[in-house]
Image (spheres, helix red, strand yellow):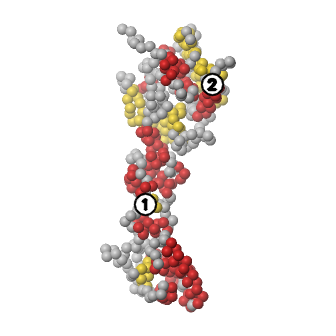
Amino acid sequence: MSETWFNVDKRGLAALMKGRSKAYILHELVSNAWDQQVTTVEVTIEPLPNKAAAAIRVVDDDPEGFTDLSHAYTLFASSEKKANAEKRGRFNLGEKLVLALAHRAEIITTKGGVRFDESGRHTLRGCRSKGSQIEVEVPITRAEMDEMIASTRCLIKPPGIKTTVNGEELPERESVANFQTKLPTLIADEEGVLRRIERKTRVQVYEPLPGEVAMLYEMGIPVVETGDRFHVDVQQKVLLNSDRDNVTPAYLRAVRVAVLNNVEIEPEDASQTWVREACSDERAAPEAVKKALTARFGENAVAYDPSDPEANKISTAEGRQIVYGGNLTAAEWENARRAGALPPAGQVTPSPKPFHPDGTPLNPVRQWTDGMFRVADFILRAHEELIGKPIDVTFVNDRDWKFNATYGRSGFILNLHCLGRDFFEQGISERVIDLVIHEFGHAHSSDHLSRAYNDALTMLGAKMTRLALEKPELFR
């Protein structure tokens, strides 16, 4: 029984390609050549005289040439490329799409030759000793031809394959990262049916050249613009759509996660969409998430802590970035917690809690030095002068209480462990005066970030200056 059930309308097939960049033609021909056992590929693109058309010729040096010349014109013929994830072909379709757009075409290989023209398909007697030559005449404007030639600069040629375009060799591109990861791909089973599998593959990452938009590549052939930070070249079949010009969002997300896990990013990259998408994926490595969040918010950033409002203000006063709930998605927060990034402010800069009924009492200092007596006397007398009422002064030595001092209902408490003994033995130094003004400011406001607190500090500074002029003995 004949297997020829269908006819293919060449014009209808060409219509399917209408609207796509003509660069597609060249990419198909070059990718087919790169899939062979070649060391050189020569591309020539020339305008045809007195025609809105160009001749495109691709010549390679594969010793075997075409395995089966009939595959050049047989749609969906069984192909050895289907079983090899590291070959670009899938359906034996690419050349046919190119032929559908052509006015004329000729293929000469080691197995013979075939010509296509307005009268049909013709077998040629000649053959090549090695390699293949494909030449097609396609309708194309000069602008489209220039665009096609320019598109060849985006190609990332495989190592060891010299590729020239109109005599100019494509340069080697140096990758900024080269790693292995698992990504989904397509591969044919024993019956020739393409199946999706997860497979370890090599991925190469490149800096886009000036004027280039970052793209996703399949083994050196650009697939789709991503607008991300890097060109990403996957060294196996990419999960393409039927038009072979895009990928699914899920596939792109997997690629972005792989890049985040293996490539150092700069602070200016950290808030980009691709980084945030990768940071919200459960496959993102904790250390990669932590690095990305550090690059975005700073080394000492903390999460806003609703259970300890004062801790948030203390963190801000220390110059830490406060990250609020709305700054990250729920998935990003989950990964941040998993990575140990962005701890709550209450863990990093907890507000003083030793005076809470459930808090642990501080360790008082029973034996005061002369320096401690002098500082205590200065605080008592300065408080009378500046605040207008008496106050108690206490010294503690507590390593678990991470504060220099506190001021409030319990009086003025100074922590010897944080301040150190030298603080007290240097007399009424600038450090002592600075600490006293800072704490006395809380007589007017407990909020370090409030206008009232800021105004209190300037007012106290002025009063302290006048006090020093009028009663200098307090400062000796």
Q: Label 1 sits on what residue type?
A: Ala
Residue 290: percent from left, percent from top? 45, 54
Query: In screen coordinates, is 259 left or right of 41?
Result: left
Above-or-below relation of 175 to 244: below
Label 1 sits on a secondary structure element that is strand
> Seen from this angle, which residue lies furthest right?
49
> Seen from this angle, which residue lies furthest left?
358
Query: In screen coordinates, is 456 left or right of 47?
Result: left
Residue at the spot x=39%, y=67% of the render? Answer: 308
Question: Looking at the rendering, which quadrant does residue 4 occupy?
Answer: top left
Tell me the residue that label 2 is attached to.
Answer: 141
Query: In screen coordinates, is 210 left or right of 2?
Result: right
Tell me the residue that label 1 is attached to.
Answer: 303
| CB under 8 Å between discs 1 and 2 | no
Who comes first in sequence, dot 1 or dot 2?
2
Residue placed most toward the observer, 233 or 23: 23
Label 2 sits on a secondary structure element that is loop
Residue placed most toward the observer, 418 or 257: 257
